[in-house]
Image (tube, rainbow, N blue to C red):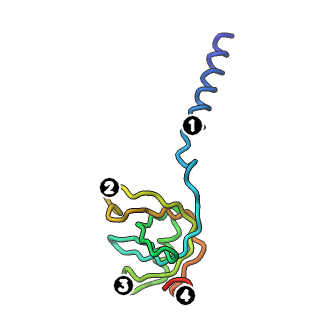
């Protein structure tokens, strides 16, 4: 009986810790519309609404794939994208450190070579 009480107490402690240690609880997925460009050293996203530039991280594993399938002759060609993602502060070292913020792409909604002038100048 004593082991059951200890086991139940342990489960309660683990459950409470797991609920309080949710690293994604303050992250809100948002729809972003803008220009994405990629190459060997840079993956950037420029928000059409704010004009702000972000380092882009593709956690969807689709953005970089679809970008490469557009078959550009040179890297860093901009494309119009609509993506769902989470904006966060960039780290102080490593790739993307020269940007204030990083956009973590969770889902690709649209990607096209045609940049709409009425949406993104």
Q: Which numbered marker is on residue 74?
A: 3
Q: CA distance from mark 4 to mark 2?
A: 34 Å
Q: Name the spot of residue 14 as percent of width and height, x first.
A: 58, 30
Residue under circle 1? 20
Query: In the rendered image, which residue does mark 2 sit on?
Result: 92
In the rendered structure, which disc, 4 or 2, sits on the residue that comes first in sequence? 2
Q: Which residue sits at x=63%, y=26%?
A: 12
Q: Residue 105 bears which disc, if any? A: none
If you read the primary sequence from the N terminus, does the residue marked by circle 2 or circle 3 appear first?
A: 3
In space, the residues marked 4 and 3 are separated at their CA atoms by 21 Å
Relative vertical location of residue 42 with respect to residue 3 in this rendering, above or below: below
Mark 2 falls on what kind of element? Answer: loop
Q: Which mark is residue 116?
A: 4
Residue 94 screen position, x and y as percent: 31, 58
Q: How far is the residue under mark 4 from the one under mark 1?
A: 43 Å
Q: For the residue carrying disc 3, how many other residues have a C-alpha within 10 Å: few (<14), some (14-19), or many (20+)?
A: few
Q: CA distance from mark 1 to mark 3?
A: 47 Å
Q: Nearer the viewer, mark 2 or mark 3?
A: 2
Question: Does dot 4 land on a helix, a strand or a loop?
Answer: loop
Query: Would residue 96 appear left or right of 19 to someone viewing this image?
Result: left
Q: Earlier in the sequence, mark 2 or mark 1?
A: 1
Query: Residue placed at 51% from the left, 86% from the top?
Result: 115
Label 1: which secondary element: helix
What is the quadrant of the N terminus in the image? top right
Residue shown at 55%/87% (left/top)? 116
Q: Secondary structure at mark 3?
A: loop
Label 4 vs label 3, nearer the camera: 4
Marks 4,1: beta carbons within 8 A: no
Depth check, mark 1 against mark 3: the one in front is 1
Q: Are marks 4 and 3 in contact (CB under 8 Å)?
A: no
């Amino acid at each position: 009986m004593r082991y059951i009480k200890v086991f139940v107490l342990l489960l309660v402690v683990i459950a409470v810790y797991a609920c309080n240690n949710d690293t994604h609880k303050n992250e809100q997925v948002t729809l972003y519309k803008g220009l994405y460009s990629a190459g060997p050293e840079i993956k950037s996203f420029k928000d059409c609404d704010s004009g702000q530039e972000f380092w882009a991280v593709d956690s969807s594993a689709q953005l970089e794939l679809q970008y490469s399938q557009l078959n550009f002759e040179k890297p860093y060609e901009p494309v119009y994208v609509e993506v769902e993602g989470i904006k966060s502060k960039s780290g102080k070292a490593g790739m993307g450190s020269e940007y204030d913020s990083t956009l973590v792409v969770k889902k690709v909604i649209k990607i096209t070579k045609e940049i709409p002038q009425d949406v993104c100048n």
